[in-house]
Structures are given as structure tokens and as C-alpha cells.
Amino acid sequence: MSKKFLNPAKNHLVVWGATGQLLVINEFADSVGLKIACVVDENKRIESPLLGTPIVHSKAELADWLTLQDQSIKFSTVVAIGGSRGRERATIAAELQSMGLAAQNVIHPYAHIAEDATYDDGLQLMMGAVVATRCHLGSYCIVNTNASIDHECNLSSGVHVGPGACLAGCVYLGKNSFIGAGATVLPKIKIGDNVIVGAGSVVTKNLPNDCTAYGNPARIITQPNR
């Protein structure tokens, strides 16, 4: 799917997740035509962090809330949970879409995406993030503040790139992988599915599926038995 820009009309947004990622999105939501109408979090001890914005604590409660809304309003959704929870983001997003809530791209006005870069639904792109020429970002990716995705990188679905991390050119990231804050991935590196790269690490060699690596150079510290 080619990249899509936000409709300038106000879009009403249901956000799943009531902690840090929600707050980051809320900081610029209004400036890109988004109104956070409801927050969902399954932790019943969490109250809404946004004054005047309701919170519900299950999909059933959300369904009840939606029935009380003006039926002419079209709601979209973003799943604001990060880290290595990409598979969970996709699962929740699919459940919310089955309730009629389309996945919303949330893109900070001071982020940059090259004209020939593409991305799928559910992208979260924060302030100062850069996505360079001929990149592709799969569904439900998060690229946090000041992260840099250089030319011809390919991020699979559910990837999260932490604040200040840098992917040099032609990097491939597998599904649901997480690149920690300030980490660097050197050119043409391939990182498998479900990989965690620790904050500040420098990845100089390919990493297989289902491992955790950190350090400079990054070394695998956990990996399933083969």
C-alpha cells in the first residue's frame, strides 16, 4: 500500500494504551487533525491521563461506549503499545478493526518521509524521525523521536525503532523486532523476526530470529535452544 496522508478534517481517534506512547501522540494530535475521543487500557487501575477524555478497560466496554456515540462519526484507532509487542499491536488492531475502527496513521508534523517511501496502515512516526528514500515500513510500525531510517531500509510489520536509533542504508528488520534507544544498525544488516537490540548497541553482523543482542559490537545474549 502506498503512503497516505491524513485527511485535514478532524478524525476521532480511539487509542489503545494509556501510558507513555499515548502521551507522545496526544502532544501533536490536534495539529494533524486528530481528536483523541477515548482511551482503552485493560489495566483497571489506570485512570485516563488526558483530562476530559474517557477511558474504558475492555473491548466490551469500548463496544458499549461506541453505541452511545453519534453514529455519523467515523472513529479510527491506534494501538499505542511499544517495545517488543509488535505481534500484540497487530492482534489488537485486527480486533478493533472488526469493531469498525480503521487503523490510523499518526505522523508528527516535524517528521520527514521521503516522497518515494511507502508504508502500510497503523504507522506511528514521532517528532524528528526521518524515513529516507525508497524505504518501506510494514503495518503497525513505530518510529520514535529523532530516529533515522536511511535509504532502502525495509521494516516488516510490528517493528519498533526507539528514540534516537539509527538504521544505516539497506537494513532489513524482521517482524516484531525492537531496536532500543540510541542503537545503530550498520548498512545491509539483516535482523530476523522477534529480535530485541539493546539501547546504545551497535549491530555489525546479521542477527537470527528470536534473539536478544546488545553491546558494541552487539552480541547475542539470549537465543532459543535449537
Image (cartoon, helix red, strand yellow):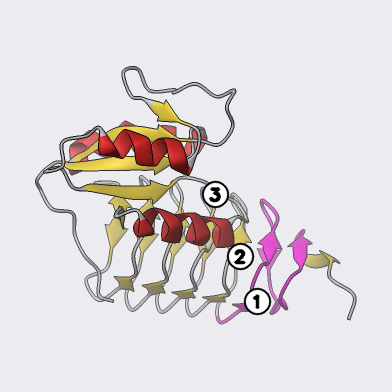
Which of the image's four quarters has the C terminus? bottom right
Query: Where are the magenta residues, as a range?
Result: 188-216
Q: Are the residues at dot 1 and dot 3 in contact (C-beta closer than 8 Å)?
A: no
Point 45% across, 76% down: residue: 153
Which of the image's four quarters has the N terminus? bottom left
Magenta region includes residue 210: yes
Point 10% across, 48% down: residue: 8
Q: Mark 2 points at which residue?
A: 177
Point 27% across, 68% down: residue: 114
Q: Name the residue under label 3.
A: 82
Residue 19 showing in the rendered view = yes
Q: Is mark 3 on a helix, strand or loop?
A: loop
Return the x and y of residue 209 as percentages of the image width and height: 71, 76
Foreground residue among 123 and 87? 87
Quarter of the view holding residue 62: top left
Return the x and y of residue 150 as percentages of the image width and height: 43, 69
Distance between the alpha carbons at the discs numbered 1 and 3:
18 Å
Q: Are the residues at dot 1 and dot 2 in contact (C-beta closer than 8 Å)?
A: yes
Residue 27 lies, with reference to residue 86, above or below; the image says above
Please name the amino acid that badge 3 sits on.
Answer: Gly
Please name the amino acid that badge 2 sits on.
Answer: Ser
The crowding category of the residue bearing disc 1, from other C-alpha atoms within 10 Å (few below 14, some 14 to 19, many at least 20), is many
